[in-house]
Amino acid sequence: MKTISKKIIRKTLIYNTRVEYGDYTMNHVLGCAHGCKYPCYAYLQKKRFGQISSYEEWCEPALVENTLDILDSELPKYKNKIQMLHLCFTTDPFMYHYPEIQKMSVAAIKKVNSYGITCSVLTKGTLLHELRNLSSRNEYGITIVSLDEQFRNQMEPGAAPVIDRISALQKLHDAGCKTWVSIEPYPTPNIIQQDIMEILEKVSFVDKIIFGRMNYNKMVTAYKDHKIFYNNMASKVISFCNDRNISYHIKNKTIS
């Protein structure tokens, strides 16, 4: 287990995402120890605007220590606007090996639920089983782009092993929670050779699957048939979900 070495104070947390499948979000951590190398859009964004100076700094997460106070201030103003509050778009609420962040995330979800607002969660860590005791309307998700642990270790060096993510999600599903999987950013065959059907079968118990292409990576565009490839992968996801009555969403610009 790791401890947080840096904490920060913020004035606001909740904002409208303007993302196709999102609504409102909060990011109560700056940085992410998972250190994804796809590259990570959140890291590129924070570095571009001077909030992070280096990859090493990004991998040393800073917790917003006044998170719950801000929520008490902002939630009354937003509660009639928010359809679902997402944790998180620019960090990870259940960061692997960071119990302090995980504890704050659970407290934040409880706080949001107490105002009658539903939460959506996405992580490359492991979801805590205690989440089963929170609002039944909450939706808990994990990101998986490959079952290959060597690839995971290369591209998501600080994240939880894939099998651990799936196991934790399965436990929440078995407890009656709504669960989902994000298969994004999905790599092209010149990055890794794999069968997407194996991933889909592993997570066939979930309620929803989101699929999206890999962006900001020159190896993707270097793959001559990347447009055809993503069209084919999206088609497989749609067919799989339709056959099993699973909801799905194909991210914008994934299909040509």
Image (tube, helix red, strand yellow):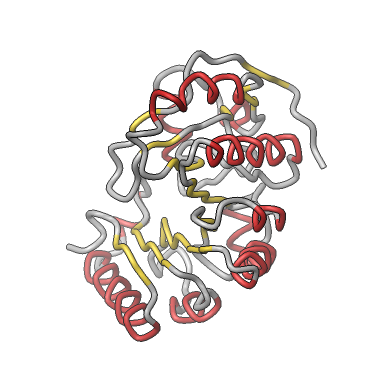
112 is higher (above) or lower (below) than 20: above
Residue 85 quadrant: top left
Quarter of the picture holding the C terminus? bottom left
Q: Position of residue 163 (x, y in %)?
A: 67, 68
Instruction: Let me know if residue 40 appears in the view.
Output: no
Residue 169 quadrant: bottom right
Lateral position of residue 53 relative to residue 80, left or right: right
Residue reaching furthest right?
1
Q: Position of residue 127 (x, y in %)?
A: 65, 55
Lateral position of residue 111 relative to residue 25, left or right: right
Residue placed at 57% from the left, 70% from the top?
Answer: 147
Q: Nearer the viewer, residue 250 or 53?
A: 250
Residue placed at 48% from the left, 63% from the top?
Answer: 180
79 is higher (above) or lower (below) than 197: above
Q: Nearer the viewer, residue 165 or 119?
A: 119
Q: Position of residue 138 (x, y in %)?
A: 51, 53
Residue reaching furthest left?
256
Q: Position of residue 74 (x, y in %)?
A: 46, 22
Residue placed at 35% from the left, 45% from the top?
Answer: 22
192 is higher (above) or lower (below) than 24: below
Q: Nearer the viewer, residue 202 or 47?
A: 202
Quarter of the picture holding the N terminus? top right
Instruction: Let me know if residue 123 appears in the view.
Output: yes
Residue placed at 54% from the left, 20% from the top?
Answer: 70
Total marks shown come to: 0
